[in-house]
Amino acid sequence: MTTTATAGSVGLVTAQTLHFDEPLALACGRSLDSYDIVYETYGELNADRSNAVLICHALSGHHHAAGRYRTDDRKPGWWEECIGPGKPIDTRRFFVVSLNNIGGCHGSTGPASINPGTGQPWGPDFPDLRVRDWVHSQARLADRLGIDCWAAVIGGSLGGMQAMRWALLYPDRLRHCVVIAAALRLSAQNLAFNEIARHAIEADPDFDNGHYLRNGKVPVRGLSLARMIGHITYLSDDAMADKFGRELRSGSLEQGATEAAEFQVQSYLRYQGSQFSESFDANTYILMTRALDYFDLAREYGDDPVAALENSRCRFLVVSFSTDWRFSPARSREIVDALIAARRDVTYVNIDASEGHDAFLMPIPRYLDVFSAYMQRVEADR
Amino acid sequence: MTTTATAGSVGLVTAQTLHFDEPLALACGRSLDSYDIVYETYGELNADRSNAVLICHALSGHHHAAGRYRTDDRKPGWWEECIGPGKPIDTRRFFVVSLNNIGGCHGSTGPASINPGTGQPWGPDFPDLRVRDWVHSQARLADRLGIDCWAAVIGGSLGGMQAMRWALLYPDRLRHCVVIAAALRLSAQNLAFNEIARHAIEADPDFDNGHYLRNGKVPVRGLSLARMIGHITYLSDDAMADKFGRELRSGSLEQGATEAAEFQVQSYLRYQGSQFSESFDANTYILMTRALDYFDLAREYGDDPVAALENSRCRFLVVSFSTDWRFSPARSREIVDALIAARRDVTYVNIDASEGHDAFLMPIPRYLDVFSAYMQRVEADR
């Protein structure tokens, strides 16, 4: 069962871009006349085009999920632990498609792109997006790649929400749906954290009501704070205790020490926030968190998740992690209970892991084993 | 047992101020040459001065714990539910002393006070304080009020930490120690939330490195954000769900709705943040959160809570609340376990409550009953 011993990397990869000219009608009522989607693929599409899997990314994710652009890249793609030869999403068996969603800031058309109507960056005038808009745009990407039906649509966190929406909007275009560390919708506490993150960005004078790019500014402080807030919710209390405890980075706790002591967790968070603020677009962060806030799988089905999921035809794998408090195991069980009530085929596993929400990115042996086993079933179901 | 049926208010109260001229040596190595302490008292000190209880306040608290200044005050003191005739801290039996700690911003000397050395507000030059500094200043207040030994020192959250420190620093000056929703020290996650709150304040351009008062500014945005962040940690996920769920304040979730929908929790948090930023001093907020961060009851006792608590001589009541995730029941059990190992007399109760950390301020019947019963024992022990 354990496949991780032989696991390798997809190696060097190249991002590709497709341009779409047919207007995309959006949930907000507006439409996007034309747009680019940046994506990567790993592995080979088989002759009957039955081995394609789609990776949907989370809040701050992008298309670069595996491999490296150059051999000396410091870090591989964000899901290197799960995608590659011998890994759960085995690129010797599957043709893996990973994209940057529209509204993103890693090459696909988003708020930092030029609005053809004005010649200026879209900024806050970029249309509000919902998870369903991403799914529709991903379906067009599938059309262009000649993929009628995905062997699986797979995502963690916000990515898992896209996978579930796929199952309802295009029930005949996926055979399996893999929903990791997700939820049917956000709780009030989830909403509150996102609200504070957005508020931090909007309160930064350099945000300029979203027109910072036009004005040659970047709301570094606000975006950094937003990331710090998010980061706490990705880690469990235990994970933080293991990682930092109350260790000091500098100074002393002795009474009367002249140098101010600084806890490691403080410098870690500041570093994380600062790094993120240099590489991510503030309007995209606002757009993505709002898409999260407004996601509600069952809303248009009379708020009944069972009625919603009765529209699906695929099989499901649902995974949660014991110390995840952003989308706790209880939230995954709501999905599983609804799937069972809707008489759908669902495999559920709650993985003991100390890493909190971030566990879905981590090489936790039981997680990788379960994920690998399920993907072998996906392959057998082709 | 239930005393709440007959519970009343202490009615109209007046704050008093005492000036202290003897320099107070602080843990940071500096000293405060002179300072004011603002306080209130409720009930009457008895002839043998044996019925005095001290209330220690939490992060954003102050001396006004019960009653009203005028009959038309919109709100009573912050612990009105627990202090008054027939309430757990029964003012027919106890002489209650409630103060604003030094470093505060409600009348006691703090960062917003004038530094006699410069004629300007202290601002960021106000000395860093530790919980022990508050305890020493409270002991001097006791001296001035003629109280040799408190019947009980009582506090919730950061107030409970002061009560525990009292038990170690002045073991002969309290007979009971009531520690509600507290912890032996902060976890890495606790530290992280405080760090982000401070960072939000410091990142506000109007903070001016702490010299905002001198420059006629107030870091409203940063302080508001800090409060919003704190507020999430005071409420449980359940409490937020009960209070707001995903209810909308305005707009519609329908696709294509022209008016932006706003979740109630968002406007609530913005309101809370905004109100707080108008009434609280940013430097005090930083000072108080740092005192919390550095509190570590056992640090100077070889990091052994048992060795630390062996220095106490009083009896203890420890209270936690089931959904408190800021200082969870597990953190209270650490205190209780150490007290038992130190062979101290401890009563512990974990109250089922949906309100999270804020529960310690709420009129939860079992909480009030247990608290009342314990305080009757305190009275009997006089």
Image: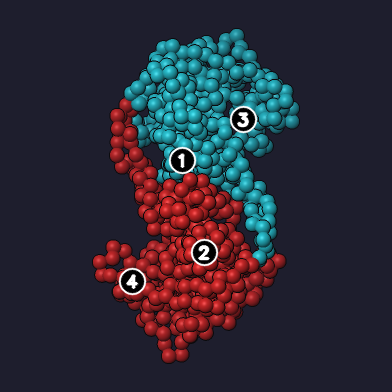
Chain colours: A cyan, B red
Residue found at x 47% / y 76%: B19
- Separation of residues labelled 3 and 4 (CA atoms): 57 Å
**Residue B346 or B110: which is nearer the viewer?**
B110
- How far from the left and from the top, in percent, is residue B368? 40, 69
Q: Does residue B350 show up?
A: no
Q: Which residue is mark 4?
A: B67
Q: Who comes first in sequence, dot 2 or dot 4?
A: 4
Specify whether disc 1 shares its chain with disc 4.
Answer: no
Q: Which residue is mark 2?
A: B118
Label 1 marks a residue whose chain is A
Which of the labelled discs sits on residue A78, or is there none? 3
Q: Which residue is mark 1?
A: A204
Give above or below for B89 relative to A15: below
**Residue A4 or A22: which is nearer the viewer?**
A22
Label 4 marks a residue whose chain is B
**Type of the residue with mark 4:** Gly
Point out the frontmost of discs 3 and 1.
Answer: 1
**Type of the residue with mark 2:** Thr
**Type of the residue with mark 1:** Asp
> In the picture provided, is A298 more to the left or to the right than B131?
left
